Image: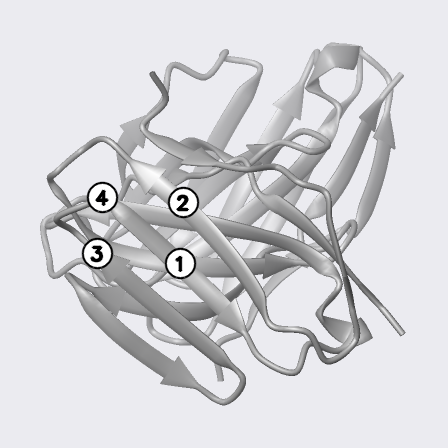
Amino acid sequence: QKEVEQDPGPLSVPEGAIVSLNCTYSNSAFQYFMWYRQYSRKGPELLMYTYSSGNKEDGRFTAQVDKSSKYISLFIRDSQPSDSATYLCAMKGAGANNLFFGTGTRLTVIP
Amino acid sequence: DTEVTQTPKHLVMGMTNKKSLKCEQHMGHRAMYWYKQKAKKPPELMFVYSYEKLSINESVPSRFSPECPNSSLLNLHLHALQPEDSALYLCASSQRGVGGYTDTQYFGPGTRLTVL
């Protein structure tokens, strides 16, 4: 079993839709959770960073962490064509530098 | 400013060549990382430098040789690579070194390497 599971998609939605992206994980030691956005042939760009359980909102993006279920989500409201990219979840334990990535979900927002 | 820069953007090399990738950050970060990313795959950790010392080497072949000349610079020296080493090589940095508070990694744009 992989440490982090993420549906690779692809996921296509119309412009303006609400997008839900999810990851599950197996290691209960993970405490820090991140979402990165990666455009084609570019480096990952940090979108959201959360610690432990709870919600965090930043503009059109909301990150949720449910440690009891080992499940994290990223919601994108009012999706735009510029949101078309691969979204990678990543997580790590306290005091660790190793990031464990999901495989990434490829999202296309259709105008 | 959360910028990590990498040069060159693209590199094509033969299997007998020696080349180097360069990474730079001026955020005062004390941990720097090299990752390798194949198409449609997540990044894979190669090396971690903490306070200019190599702290993690993920069993990477010796044809990849990292170097951290100072706290702002990270190099990856390449020699006798194989075609399967063709990938996007990503550099990242984070504020504190290994053993400190866990914090966020910021990635550079990557160097796209093709080995012929």
Residue occupying image coordinates x 83% and y 28%: B114
Q: Are discs 2 and 1 located on one and the same chain? A: yes
Residue occupying image coordinates x 42% and y 33%: A5
Toward which corner of the image does residue B20 lie, by quadrant? top right
Which dot marks residue A70?
4
Q: Are discs 4 and 2 located on one and the same chain? A: yes
Element class at badge 2: strand
Could you tell me the amino acid type at mark 1?
Ser
Marks 2 and 3 sit apart, C-alpha to C-alpha, by 11 Å
Question: Badges 4 and 3: C-beta atoms under 8 Å apart?
Answer: yes
Please name the residue that numbered disc 1 is placed on. Answer: A73
Toward which corner of the image does residue A43 lie, by quadrant? bottom right
Question: Badges 2 and 1: C-beta atoms under 8 Å apart?
Answer: yes
**Label 2 or label 3, whichever comes before in sequence order:** 2
Please name the residue that numbered disc 2 is placed on. Answer: A23
Q: Chain of mark 1?
A: A
Element class at badge 1: strand
Could you tell me the amino acid type at mark 2?
Cys
Question: Badges 4 and 2: C-beta atoms under 8 Å apart?
Answer: no
Within 10 Å of disc 3 (Cα), the crowding (few <14, some 14-19, many 20+) is some
Residue occupying image coordinates x 53% and y 61%: A20
Please name the residue that numbered disc 3 is placed on. Answer: A66
User: Where is the C terminus of chain A found, in terms of image quarters?
Assistant: bottom right
**Label 4 or label 2, whichever comes before in sequence order:** 2
